[in-house]
Image (spheres, rainbow, N blue to C red):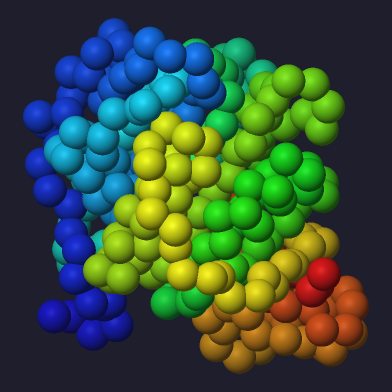
């Protein structure tokens, strides 16, 4: 194995058997119970190398999970990026052109630009819009504890707290600040109105078996919470730890560097230096500033780090 590559305990497999689906949209499968109940979307592979979602989605399809009430939709979002996986460069197929999880605004979806991600988002737009509740399965480049990510709407917090795992929450009072994610598309990005819960589960490091196991467990918990499947009671969760997103800092120059290697969840005192980006210093905006998702390799135009505070 070349140096500095992660352990590849879980790697992509052939998804061609799932391509046809039954909705008229490739890689989208829908199952209706015929009984009143919510429409729940389980979405995998928003990023091509975040393999845990694929494991959870194929688990649902391969084991014949079907809703007792309501409707279940299972989607593989970005199979084109997934199929570009290279075990020698396992981080590089996150996206092909655009970040599929930052373009869910009318400005992007109805705009003139074109890319594999925009074409796929436009195709999936009715799938996302139709869902009452959304679980978008993700993973992280660094081996950190799993955590929820969601807009700071009570409906989202209620579901995440009720499910219990992950026990860590990243709450976004003003969105990500770097684009519109899938879970904030349309009515799901509005505080009032008829929307249900829409959450991201960051299940652990991309290629670990424990991450895939977490994705399967959280998916079943999510379906059980809304009554689509029967779910045995789970062990009592750990006490929740919640963080509020204060700033999303972007990489502006090729000279960007952190003052020390960061994995995520490191804590800085107010005004302590976190990174330098050309002539700009990035300092902690508060005491107990906790950094999440620091870039493994800074790339100009992409996110550098989330700056948060504990709630």
Residue 159 in the image: above or below residue 24: below
Q: Nearer the viewer, residue 250 or 182?
A: 182
Residue 263 in the image: above or below residue 201: below
Residue 66 in the image: above or below residue 15: above
Q: Nearer the viewer, residue 256 or 265?
A: 265
Q: Tell me the residue at 29%/8% (across/down).
A: 24
Give left or right: position of 262 versus 16: right
Q: Name which quarter of the figure residue 104 lies in.
A: top right
Q: Nearer the viewer, residue 155 or 29?
A: 155
Give left or right: position of 16 versus 147: left
Would you say residue 305 is visible in this rendering? no
Q: Residue 275, how many percent across, how many down?
A: 70, 80
Q: Residue 243, how many percent across, how many down?
A: 74, 67
Give left or right: position of 114 versus 195: left
Total count of labels: 0
Q: Tell me the residue at 66%/40% (across/down).
A: 179
Would you say residue 167 is visible in this rendering? yes
Q: Nearer the viewer, residue 77 or 117?
A: 77
Q: Residue 192, how many percent across, how many down?
A: 83, 27
Q: Tell me the residue at 82%/69% (across/down).
A: 311
Q: Name which quarter of the figure residue 271 lies in.
A: bottom right
Q: Quadrant of the N terminus?
A: bottom left
Q: Residue 50, how many percent across, how many down?
A: 35, 54
Q: Tell me the residue at 31%/11% (across/down).
A: 23
């Amino acid at each position: 194995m070349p140096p500095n590559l992660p352990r590849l305990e879980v790697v992509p497999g052939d998804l061609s058997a799932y391509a046809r689906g039954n909705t008229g949209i490739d890689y989208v499968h829908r199952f209706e119970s015929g009984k009143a109940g919510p429409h729940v979307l389980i979405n995998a592979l928003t990023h091509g190398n975040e393999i845990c979602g694929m494991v959870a989605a194929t688990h649902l399809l391969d084991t014949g999970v079907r809703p007792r009430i309501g409707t279940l939709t299972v989607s593989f979002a970005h199979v084109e990026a997934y199929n570009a996986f290279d075990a020698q460069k396992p981080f590089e197929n996150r996206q092909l052109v655009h970040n599929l999880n930052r373009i869910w605004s009318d400005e992007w979806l109805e705009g003139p630009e074109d890319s594999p991600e925009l074409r796929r988002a436009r195709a999936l737009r009715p799938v996302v819009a139709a869902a009452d509740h959304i679980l978008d399965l993700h993973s992280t480049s660094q081996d950190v504890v799993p955590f929820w990510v969601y807009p700071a709407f009570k409906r989202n917090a209620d579901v995440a707290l009720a499910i219990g795992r992950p026990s860590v929450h990243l709450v976004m009072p003003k969105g990500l600040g770097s684009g519109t994610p899938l879970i904030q598309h349309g009515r799901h990005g509005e505080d009032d109105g008829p929307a249900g819960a829409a959450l991201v589960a960051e299940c652990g490091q991309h290629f670990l078996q424990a991450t895939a196991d977490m994705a399967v467990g959280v998916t079943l918990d999510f379906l059980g919470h809304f009554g689509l499947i029967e779910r045995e009671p789970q062990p009592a969760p750990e006490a929740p730890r919640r963080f509020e997103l204060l700033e999303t800092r972007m990489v502006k120059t090729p000279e960007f560097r952190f003052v020390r290697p960061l994995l995520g969840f490191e804590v800085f005192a107010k005004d302590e230096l976190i990174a330098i980006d050309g002539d700009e210093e990035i300092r902690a905006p508060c005491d107990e500033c906790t950094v999440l998702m620091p870039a493994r390799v800074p790339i100009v135009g992409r996110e550098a780090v989330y700056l948060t505070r504990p709630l």
